Amino acid sequence: MAITPTTTLGRNTSLPYAAFNEREGVILVAGECYALNSVAVRIWELLEQPMTVAQLCSRICEEFEVDIQTCETAILNFAVEIVNDGIVHAIETAPPD
């Protein structure tokens, strides 16, 4: 499945997660530890409720100093990686009638 701005993402709630503070966290996946920086921690928090990549970019742009184009490119690349690693799920939605 291709990840686009309209792709809905939701986090894998079965994974152990620990936050050290507001800027760092870790997720354990199949014996591997993934370190999260402040933006990745915020993405994880926001994905408690599924949202599209575009919605996620909008929220990140409100909270961090980044332009929408840079944010969208970075989040799309990050989303591909974390979907492939099983950290989040790409949720398919039915096309409109």
Image (cartoon, rainbow, N blue to C red):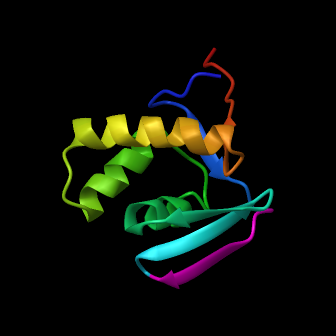
The structure residue drawn at horizontal position 52% and vertical position 84%, both measured from the top left corner, is 20
Quarter residue 37 falls in: bottom left
Quarter residue 68 falls in: top left
Lateral position of residue 23 relative to residue 48, left or right: left
Name the outermost residue toward the bottom. 21
Q: Is residue 79 above or below residue 15?
A: above
The magenta segment is: 14-21
Lateral position of residue 58 relative to residue 13, left or right: left
Q: What quarter of the picture does the C terminus occupy?
A: top right
Residue 67: give x, y in percent of width and height: 19, 45
Residue 63: give x, y in percent of width and height: 28, 64
Q: Nearer the viewer, residue 89 or 28?
A: 28
Tag count: 0
Lateral position of residue 25 relative to residue 68, left or right: right
The structure residue drawn at horizontal position 34% and vertical position 56%, both measured from the top left corner, is 60
Residue 5: give x, y in percent of width and height: 44, 31
Name the outermost residue toward the top. 97
Quarter residue 17 falls in: bottom right
Q: What quarter of the picture does the N terminus occupy?
A: top right
The structure residue drawn at horizontal position 60% and vertical position 19%, both measured from the top left corner, is 96
Q: Is residue 94 magenta?
A: no
Residue 51: give x, y in percent of width and height: 54, 47
Name the outermost residue toward the front. 32
Main SS class of the magenta portion in the image: strand
Lateral position of residue 6 relative to residue 13, left or right: left
Q: Is residue 36 above or below residue 68?
A: below
